[in-house]
Image (cartoon, rainbow, N blue to C red):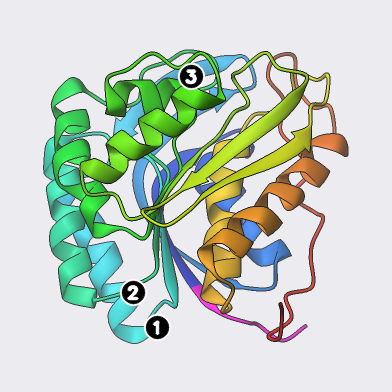
Amino acid sequence: MKIKSKILIIAGSDSSGGAGIQADIKTVTSLGCYAMTAITAITSQNTTGVLSILPVSAKNISQQIEFTSKDIKPDAIKIGMLHSTPVIRSVINSLKKININKIILDPVMVAKGGAKLIDSKSIKILRSELIKKVSLITPNIPEAEILSGIQIKNTEDMILASKLLIDMGAKNVLIKGGHNKSKFVIDIFVNKIEIVKFKSKRYKTKNTHGTGCTLSSAIASFYSCGKTLKKSCEMAIKYVNQAISSGPKFGKGNGPINHLNTFIINKKFK
C-alpha cells in the first residue's frame, strides 16, 4: 500500500492502547497515512480508569513538533490532549512556525472513566485562542457544554452550541452526539454556511474507549488526502462505527474499538 499523506499527532499516550496517541497512530496507519507524534503526557491507564498522568514539558512538546516538521512536513495535524496553559501556548507558537493549514482539534477534557485531563485555565485559553487557529473542532456533548457555556439536551441545543463556538472564532464545528440517549447517534457539523446532521446506528456496547481520538485522527487522514471537511467527517464517522461494531471486547471496563478496518481513499470523489 502506498502512503497517501503525512499526519502529525499532538496528544497524550494511553498505556492500554485504546485511546490517545496509540489509537491515533493505529487509525492513521489503517487509513493508509504516515503518523508522526508529539507526545504531551504519559498516562497509566486501562479500561477501568486512569491511574496517573505524567505531563511532558511545554518546551519538549514544541521541540517534538518543530524538529519533526522541519524534516518531514505534515499534510495535516491532529491535536488531542493539552493539559496546561503553557502547553497550549507553546503549541500555538509552534503551529505558527511550521505553518500547516489543515488542523483538527479534539478538545480532550475528561477521560471515559471520568478523570479530568485538563485544568480550568487551560480551558479558557483553548476557548479564547486555540479554536481560532484550527480548521475543525470536534467536542463531544460534555466538552461542547464546557466550551459554549450552555446545557445540551437535544440536537437543537447542539446546533446552538456549535453556533456559539463559531461566534467565538471556530471555523468549523463537529459536535459528537454519542452522549445523547436517542435511538440513533446524531453528529452535527456546522460552519457559517451550512448545518449538516450525520445519523448513525447506536450500538449497545460499553466498549467505546478512544472513539473521540479515533474520529479526529480519521478526519485528519481523509482531509489530508483532499477530501472536503464535510466529506472527511462523514467518512470518519463511518470508520468509527465499523470500529465500534467489530470491537474486540478487551478489558473489564470501557474497552477499545477495532482500528483494523479501513476505507480506500480515492483521490477523485463527488
From what the image shows, is residue 119 above or below residue 176? above
Residue 234: give x, y in percent of width and height.
Answer: 66, 54
The foreground one among 188 and 32 is: 188
**Circle 1: element type:** loop
The label shown at residue 72 is 1
3D distance between C-alphas at marks 3 and 1: 33 Å
- At x 15%, y 31%, the residue is 124
Extreme front residue here?
193
- At x 36%, y 18%, the residue is 116
Q: Which residues are magenta?
A: 1-6
From what the image shows, is residue 196 above or below residue 140? below
- At x 46%, y 43%, the residue is 138
Quadrant occupied by the C terminus: bottom right
Residue 175: give x, y in percent of width and height.
Answer: 49, 36
Q: Answer whether labels 2 and 1 touch (C-beta < 8 Å).
A: yes
The answer to whether any part of residue 108 appears in the image is: no
Callout 1 amino acid: Ile
Residue named by callout 3: 50
- At x 58%, y 78%, the residue is 225
Residue 27: give x, y in percent of width and height.
Answer: 65, 56
The foreground one among 222 and 61 is: 222
Q: Main secondary structure of the magenta part?
A: loop
Q: Answer whether labels 3 and 1 touch (C-beta < 8 Å).
A: no
